[in-house]
Each structure stands twice: as structure tokens, then as C-alpha cells.
Image (cartoon, rainbow, N blue to C red):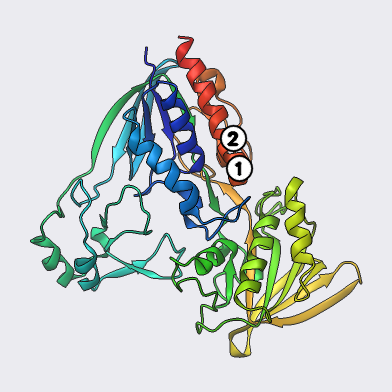
Amino acid sequence: MSNAILVVGGGFAGLTAAIEAAELGHDVYIVEKTPWLGGRVAQLNKYFPKLCPPSCGLEIQFQRIRKNPRIKFFTQAELIGLSGCKGDYTAKVRLAPRRTAAHNVDFSLLASALTGETDSEFDLGLSKRKALYKAMPFAFPDRYVLDARALSKSDMARVAGAKFIEPAEEVREIALNIGAIVVATGWKPYDVTRLTNLGAGSVKNCVSNMQLERLASPFGPTQGKIVRPSDNCAPMNVAFVQCAGSRDQNHLNYCSYICCMATLKQCLYLAEQNPNVGITVYYIDLRAPGRYVNVLEKVKARPNVSFVKGKVADAVQTEGDRVKLTVEDAVRGEKLTLIYDLVVLATGMQPSLAGEKSFLPLPLDEDGFVAGGEEAGIFAAGCARMPLDVTRTAQSGTAAALKAVQTVKGR
């Protein structure tokens, strides 16, 4: 039997669960598929409730992990097998090669000299990155990654003899003995390219709400200036399309709960950068639960923000790379055709497990959220269970950690 706990996912829920369990005296292993811990929160410009930058909360979590010898984490890692039973599992984990030294080395000069580039996953395709890269300034672990697939021929010669780089590093596998598992696999933005009627993938200045977060971030592709992707000009009128693909049986059949709040936050981003920008929010229903109603009232009070209850039918590109929306105003009973500089699609939160192969013996509901598994000592946290904001995500991480601790203590 093992008193160790495995946490699958290194986002806010996973970090919270790992720290709580470790501080109760249990060995914890974090398995995270990306090169750094932090999850989706790390990609945000600001998050509720205090509207602080992601470094505010994540740096505290990272410090607690650094200081706790009971926590071991593996990045670029995936769970590829699970055997045994509750209290005595063996987890098989595959580790992708990082190809850089195990300690912090500043590769910025070498990285800037490389010519090979590929789309930045962290910036959601809004920028390019080098083959040798570090996605965020407060990255943890504070190490570069070498993506061999993005190297040009000249790059290969440059890195071949570089100190602290191992281009030939291979994939390896490890086995972990654990007694309980916390599944904190998080969420992924819904694939906007499936929303063809809303211009996703074909209209230059239609972006997703997560892409707008990257544009607003001082560490994003435009150093925090919200501009149109087509020409890097600041938009003078912006439309938000709520429930883009959500509450739709052809896409996401549910409400993601937090999208309305994300739009209100982003209205404030735009207004702070340009008080004269015109903003229109097209919505079916607006959700501002609890204390967040104060944010809704604050945004509604701004003279340059208007709310239209109505569903957007389509978005097409027009002259000057502007975007023409066709929308029905449900209150007035009118069909409107209006033109905007920038359109933001408020897409929903889809669980990361949806449509993916999983080695966890977990029942998923029709939308891909975890719908059980506790009898096997496997506990879901955060957006693996349901769409949540950051505060409730942390709470669910604590709850899952306590259940996992009770499981291993009871064996």
C-alpha cells in the first residue's frame, strides 16, 4: 500500500491539491503535459476576484512547491498506464525530452540567433516562437525547452555544439507507486475553427476570448496593446459575441458559467486602454453570480458599452478587414447588420479530457467532464469536473486533496 498521491495536471487546481496533500504529510507527484506549471491561469492577463495578474497567485504556489520536499513534479509528462487498485496503484508516466540542462541556463542569446519558428501555443497562434524557448517570464520550472521539430538546418548546426543542450535526449518512462489520484486536467478553449458562421479561421479580425487575454497581457504578443491581428491598429469599435458555440447541441451543449464574467473583464481592458472605444456585447443571457454582479453594474454604467440581447447569425469580412455581423435584436424584434473593427468570440470551456484517450478508469459524461471514480480512489478537481472560476477551482482542489488523503489514510 502507498500513502503517496498522484496529481494529474499542474494548473491551479492541481497545484492547490498537491500543496494541500503535501502539507498534510504525504508524498505527492504532479504530472503535467506542458513544459511549465500554471495551466490556463498563466495565460490570462488578470483573473477574478481581485483582477490581479497570474503571477500574483501562481508565484505563491510555486514558492510553496519549491520549499516542500514532499512534492515532485514532472513536466512534459503524460500518464500512459495505470494498474493496481485503490490504495496500491502503479502509474506509468512517459517523459518527453526537454533537451536542455536540468538547471536554469539563460539561453536567450542563442534562442534569438535561431531562424526556425513555429506558432506559439502559449499565445494561441497570435505570435511565433523559436525552437529554443521559454513561454512566460515567471515560468516554473525556470528552464528553456528545445523543440527539435522547429529547428532549421542552420539551427541544427548552432545547437549541436552548444553547452547544456542535448539534442539527442530520448523519451523515457518511469513508474510511480501511489495510493490515490487527483485528476486536475483542466479545460481547453473550444475549437473556434468549428464556428465557421462566426468567421473563426476565415475572418482576420475575429479572435477568441482567450486570444484577447494574450493580447491584453504585458507579456503577450503585443506587450499588452489590444490591437487588430491584421494590421496592429487599435480598434475603435468592438463586438463581443457571447455563447459562441455554447448552449448549442452542435457544439457545447451547456453554459460555461464564467464566459460572461470574462467578457465584462475584457470590456474593462478595452476601456482602460482607450476610453473612446465603442463596445457592444451581444448576449442570450448574462450571468454574474454573487459578488460579481458589482462588476456587471460597473461595466453597464460605462457610457461606451452597450448590451444587446440577441443571437449573432454570422460574421463576414468586409472592406478594410472589418467584420460585418448579422444579429437579431430579440427585444426590438429587429434584424441588424453592423460593422466592427474587431469581434471577440466568447467561447466556452471544454474539459481537456473531451475527445482524448485516457488511461484513467474514469466515467465521463456526454460533455467530457468527470462523472465519478471516487470509489476507485480517483477524485476530480477544477474544470475536469465542471466549468469554474479560479476561486472555486482552488476550493475544489482542496476538497479533492482531502478526499485523496482520507483514502490513503484509511488503507
Total numbered labels placed on residues in the image? 2
Residue 301 vertical placement versus 366 (above, below): below
Q: Residue at x 57, y 77 (%)?
A: 205
Position of residue 226 measured from the top left corner of the image (x, y, whole percent):
55, 74
- Could you say where residue 342 lies in the image, as x and y percent from the top left? 62, 77
- Which residue is depicted at the point 62% across and 72% down? 272
Residue in the image at 54% along x and 21% along y: 403
Q: Residues within 10 Å of mark 1 (few under 14, many from 20)?
A: some
Q: Is residue 250 above or below residue 311?
A: above
The residues tagged by marks 1 and 2 sit, at their Cα atoms, a distance apart of: 6 Å
Res. 214 mark = none
Q: Is any part of residue 13 visible from this angle?
A: yes
What is the quadrant of residue 69 in the picture? top left
- Residue 395 is labelled as 2
315 with respect to 329 (left or right):
left
The answer to which quarter of the image holds residue 171 is: top left
Quadrant showing the N terminus: top left
Task: Tell me the SS state at disc 1.
Answer: helix
Residue visible at 90% across and 67% down in the picture: 331
Taking depth in this image into account, of 358 and 7 the one nearest to the observer is 7
The x and y percentages for residue 119 are 38, 67
Circles 1 and 2, Cβ within 8 Å, touching? The answer is yes
The residue positioned farthest toward the bottom in the image shown = 319
Of the 4 image quadrants, the one containing the C terminus is top left
The amino acid pointed to by label 1 is: Thr
Rendering coords of residue 15 (x, y %): 45, 38
Circle 1 residue: 391
Which amino acid is tagged 2? Gln
Crowd class of label 2 (few under 14; some 14 to 19; many from 20; radius 10 Å): some
Where disc 2 sits, the SS reads: helix
* Residue that extends furthest to the left in the rendered view of this protein: 161
Residue found at the far top of this picture: 411
